[in-house]
Image: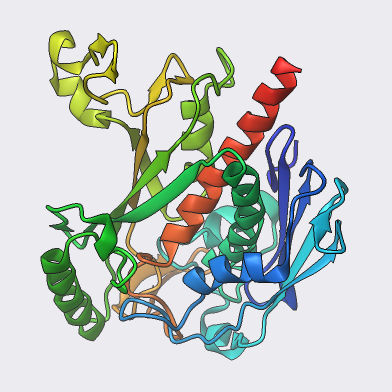
Amino acid sequence: MSGNTIGTLFRVTTWGESHGKAIGAVVDGCPPNIVLAEEDIQKELDRRKPGRGAASSPRREEDRVEILSGTFEGKTTGTPISLIIHNRDATSSDYSQIRDLFRPGHGDITYQKKYGIRDYRGGGRASGRETAARVAAGAIARKILAREEIEIIAYTRELGGIAAKGRDLNQISPSDLRCPDSEATRKMEVRIEETRKAGDSLGGIVEILVKGCPPGLGEPVFGKIDADLAGALMGIGTVKGVEIGAGFAAARMAGSECNDHITPEGFATNNAGGILAGITNGDEIVIRVACKPIASIEKEQQTIDIYGKPATIKVKGRHDVCVIPRIIPVCEAMVAITLADHLLRQNNHAS
């Protein structure tokens, strides 16, 4: 299967480049008769688009989505849904001076090695801009999940080494950083401004909760839902690590601590993160992803040019200081796409 497509029954293919004419997605396998309008997709895209919040790039993209196919009279038809988002505010001239240099932390050098050609304007296909297409497709997946009352909530768990100690989900929406701890949010905002002035960038951790997921989703042994969720999330360019439930902390526990005791009322704890043997157990799914710092920074770095000669580079242009909070709806979208696919696969088993 193409490296641009994800899913078995609910399949998503994204296309387009950061500085091309447009980006988009084709969603195949969506059931018919689901109410779907461009506004349903737009509200998710508005959460991801640039130019919002202290950590964000000043690039101003409207990210207006158009549905080109797959709906009729406001409902899905069961045929492929094609989505397009035009690039309106790309400034390719920002990259002309570094077109022959490999940017540290980017995919420039690996794309060149693989294909023998690369789009140097903003990273082309490897740009974070591509994630808008995933969010658009994820909005359709959410419509499928909503029929089963499955809800996905993601938020900032840590940014620039500052961790949220509290978890008040009511604090997420009012916060530009989508952090559930107001005190931590204030500290994060100060850290972001300090880092911006220094011409540097920050990483962070996103936590994702899935509420209302039924038991039984997942395919043994190579279609485990935790493996598919981890793979989908690792497919986001910034993500360098994924943990589910207790995650790496489980390695430091005894079995008596790690095992979730089972009572007539349900599981006493949730170290498993809602998944056992690769199959959902009906408990809340808990996932955390580690996001690396933005690679494009103004500080001078060592690199080589396309001829292999040593050089230094400062990356100018309009870039985020941190992927958080814009990466949060992308994480939610990849979880939604994965769960929608597994839900349809499970319903296929049952029929």
Query: Could you say which is closer to the camera, residue 90 or residue 6?
Result: 6
Question: Quadrant of the rendered structure where residue 81 is?
Answer: bottom right
Q: Position of residue 229 (x, y in %)?
A: 50, 35
Q: Position of residue 91 (x, y in %)?
A: 59, 88
Residue 86 lies, with reference to residue 169, above or below; the image says below
Residue 117 lies, with reference to residue 50, above or below; the image says above
Please tell me which residue is depicted at 51% across the width and 63% down the height of the picture.
308
Can I make out residue 9 in this image? yes
Query: Could you say which is closer to the camera, residue 313 or residue 243?
Result: 243
| Quadrant where the image shows the N terminus | top right
Please tell me which residue is depicted at 76% across the width and 64% down the height of the picture.
83
Residue 155 lies, with reference to residue 210, above or below; the image says below
Image side of residue 181 versus residue 284, left or right: left
Image side of residue 289 versus residue 114, left or right: left
Residue 198 lies, with reference to residue 179, above or below; the image says below
Image side of residue 226 versus residue 264, left or right: right
**Farthest residue in the front direction?**
265
Q: Position of residue 48 (x, y in %)?
A: 49, 69
| Quadrant where the image shows the C terminus | top right
Q: Position of residue 278 (x, y in %)?
A: 47, 19
